[in-house]
Amino acid sequence: MKNFGLAIVEALITLAITQIPFWVMMVMHALGDKEASFGSSLSAVLRTFSPGDALVYSAGILASSTAYAIMKIGNFKRRPYLMLLLILLPFIAVMFAMPLFIQDSNGAIENLTFANSYVIGVLLFSAALWLHALYQSRAFFEVSGPSSAGSDKIIEELGG
């Protein structure tokens, strides 16, 4: 449970830092409109996002954890299914986000209700994969140091 808590804390810190431009846009909107409230500023900023942004967010949150898994690929000998979860599934998430990006770039999204629901699904899937990767980076790749008894034995054998 400790590793899961640490994964959540890391995710929250990462999101707090990466969303600074979002908060700056909200403050700038509020400062530029004397009738603005928190809700109206939030709504104005959210209107600037489009369904195609799902690709950017999915790729952004999955990039570092996928890179970490690739760098640690040698550790998957005993549990190869983790390679699938930590390396291949993020690419699948990005592939699911790709049609949104392409259609949005072409201005060809006709069904915004479906697109918005699809964005939520892609982002939730990506977030779940990201949290899983953060947890696994602690639980599976955790390296524990030798106990003091083991250290004492090594020192004794070396003549210390």
Image (spheres, helix red, strand yellow):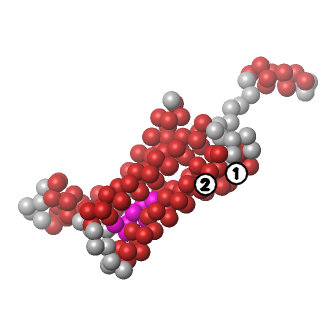
Marking on residue 87: 2
Q: Residue at x 63, y 45 (%)?
A: 82
Q: Residue at x 17, y 63 (%)?
A: 31
Could you tell me the amino acid type at mark 2? Ile
Mark 1 — residue?
73
Q: Counting other residues with Cα less than 10 Å from the Cα at mark 2, is it few (<14), some (14-19), or many (20 or more)?
A: many
Residue 110: x and y in percent read 28, 73
* Bounds of the magenta segment: 51-58
Position of residue 109 in the picture relative to residue 1 (left or right): left
Q: Secondary structure at mark 1?
A: helix
Figure quadrant of the C terminus: top right
Q: Quick check: 127 left or right of 36?
A: right
User: Label 2's element?
Assistant: helix
Labelled pair 2, 1 in contact (Cβ < 8 Å): yes
Task: Give the Cα distance between marks 2 and 1.
Answer: 9 Å
Q: Main secondary structure of the magenta part?
A: helix
Q: Does residue 121 appear to the left or right of 37 in the view shown?
A: right
Quadrant in the rendering for residue 115: bottom left
Label at residue 126: none
Name the foreground residue: 148 vs 14: 14
Instruction: Between residue 10 and residue 120, name the one nearer to us.
Output: 120
